């Protein structure tokens, strides 16, 4: 007679979950960071806030960002001039706009990931969708499933308001799903559109200036599964170990709240230093848990580029060589902080570097940070197949 234990074993995958394909997408509209302060103060009719404009110019200059993408362009803003005033009730209109645009951009990224994966869309068993830009049910996950033609039995999960740790959280969840369900193929999509949180400047609200200076729009999609099918699926990164850590008593340091005028957010100036105080502990604990002793400079790094200062603090703390955070820096430079989607772009950049023959270590770490303050840490192993892609 078959035992429950045998059934359980048969239900689980044999090997670790792996990233099998990656796709990314951005809205068509983009802007050079050098032009952003002039644009923002002009379209929000805020030229009279001259000091705030100067501050935004300073932040843009020091941000390490060259270009950012946004769905909300001047044409859409002229149809919704009330978006510029955070005291007006615009949440309904923003949610309507996001409900269409978030799954559409997510689908663009997912189509690329699925094409690279090489298997039919009907083989997707689970969908994990993460966004801070939604606010209604059924959510973007259902619309995305319909846009892609996923099977009606696909198991859907929506993660909401995880902020910049959303991509890391979704990756860990997808790993658990893939390893605990033999044959599962998880489509992870993370799409963040700033239209939910775009409004004019206000005296005394300096985090509004910071946010408008660094956040951008983007979507990342990943196919995750264990026990890859020979000759069809090509694992890029094996997902070896994952943890989540919360820094105690920091719940007020990064916050988001849906208000009648859109998503209100706060990012304290202490964030880079608070992260610096905890990151090495997370890394030591992660590597000790799997019995690997790691020299930080012998790893590859996929750190969420939340801001130039965060990358600087991590680099200094860990004594990293000058090129170790190059993938994160490049993504920050070319797209800005796309919140939860950003780490997916960094993984994509790392595998491209390796495909071009640049040296990428065998073992590495992905880290993402969000409200909590939450630190998502995942130890990754780059497979040899990566070199042949
Ligand atoms: C949303 C999520 O869930 C997760 C996230 O990713 S949250 C976002 C995380 N990102 C951050 O916290 C940004 C980290 N900060 C940085 O990268 C850098 O400080 C920066 C690019 C903003 C500025 O670069 P810098 O080298 O520090 O320059 P610095 O001269 O010290 O600062 C420039 C200005 O930015 C201001 N500034 C820095 N951090 C700020 C913050 N959190 N809020 C408001 N203003 C801020 C400074 O006060 C300074 O203002 P003045 O010019 O008026 O003095």
Image (cartoon, helix red, strand yellow):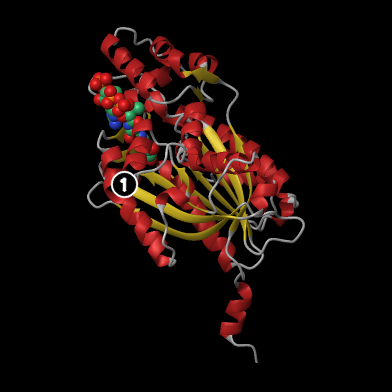
Q: Quadrant of the N terminus?
A: bottom right
Q: Nearer the viewer, residue 195 or 286?
A: 286
Residue matched to label 1: 373
The residue positioned farthest toward the top in the image shown = 48
Left or right: 316 in relation to 376: left
Q: Residue at x 35, y 55 (%)?
A: 282
* Number of marks present in the image shown: 1
Left or right: 213 in relation to 272: right
- Residue 314: percent from left, percent from top: 35, 42
Question: Does 231 sit above or below residue 311?
Answer: below
Q: Residue at x 47, y 46 (%)?
A: 301
Question: Does 314 sit above or below residue 171?
Answer: above
Describe the element under mark 1 as helix, strand or loop: loop
Residue 294 seen anywhere in this rendered image of the structure: yes
Res 261 → quadrant = top left
- Residue 44: percent from left, percent from top: 39, 14
Res 112 → quadrant = top right
Q: Nearer the viewer, residue 76 or 360?
A: 360
Residue 89 seen anywhere in this rendered image of the structure: no
Mark 1 crowdedness (10 Å alpha carbons): few <14, some 14-19, many ≥20:
many
């Amino acid at each position: 007679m078959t035992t429950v234990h045998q059934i359980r074993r048969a239900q689980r995958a044999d090997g670790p979950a792996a990233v099998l394909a990656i796709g990314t997408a951005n809205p068509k509209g983009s802007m050079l960071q050098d032009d952003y302060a002039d644009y923002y103060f002009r379209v929000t009719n805020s030229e009279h806030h001259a000091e705030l404009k100067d501050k935004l110019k300073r932040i843009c200059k020091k941000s390490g960002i060259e270009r950012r993408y946004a769905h909300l362009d001047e044409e859409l803003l002229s149809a919704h001039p009330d978006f510029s005033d955070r005291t007006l009730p615009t949440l309904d209109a923003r949610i309507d706009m996001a409900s269409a645009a978030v799954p559409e951009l997510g689908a663009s990224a997912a189509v690329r990931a699925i094409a690279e994966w090489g298997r039919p869309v009907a083989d997707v068993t689970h969908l994990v969708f993460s966004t801070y830009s939604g606010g209604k049910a059924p959510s973007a996950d259902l619309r995305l499933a319909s846009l892609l033609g996923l099977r009606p039995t696909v198991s859907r999960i929506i993660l909401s308001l995880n902020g910049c740790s959303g991509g890391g959280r979704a990756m860990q969840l997808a790993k658990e799903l893939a390893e605990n369900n033999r044959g599962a193929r998880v489509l992870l999509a993370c799409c963040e559109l700033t239209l939910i949180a775009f409004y004019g400047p206000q005296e005394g609200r300096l985090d509004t200036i910071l946010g408008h200076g660094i956040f951008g729009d983007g979507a990342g999609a990943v196919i995750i599964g264990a026990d890859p099918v020979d000759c069809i699926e090509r694992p890029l990164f094996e997902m070896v170990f994952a943890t989540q850590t919360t820094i105690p008593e920091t719940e007020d340091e990064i916050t988001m709240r849906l208000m009648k005028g859109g998503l209100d957010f706060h990012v304290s100036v202490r964030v880079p230093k608070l992260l610096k105080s905890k990151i090495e502990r997370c890394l030591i604990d992660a590597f000790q848990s799997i019995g690997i002793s790691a020299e930080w400079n012998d790893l590859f790094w996929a750190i969420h580029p939340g801001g130039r200062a965060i990358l600087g603090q991590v680099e200094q703390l860990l004594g990293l060589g000058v090129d170790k955070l190059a993938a994160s820096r490049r993504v920050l430079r070319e797209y800005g902080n796309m919140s939860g989607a950003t780490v997916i772009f960094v993984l994509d950049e790392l595998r491209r570097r390796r495909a071009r023959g640049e040296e990428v270590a065998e073992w590495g770490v992905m880290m993402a940070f969000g409200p909590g303050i939450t630190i998502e840490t995942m130890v990754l192993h780059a497979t040899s197949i990566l070199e042949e892609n």
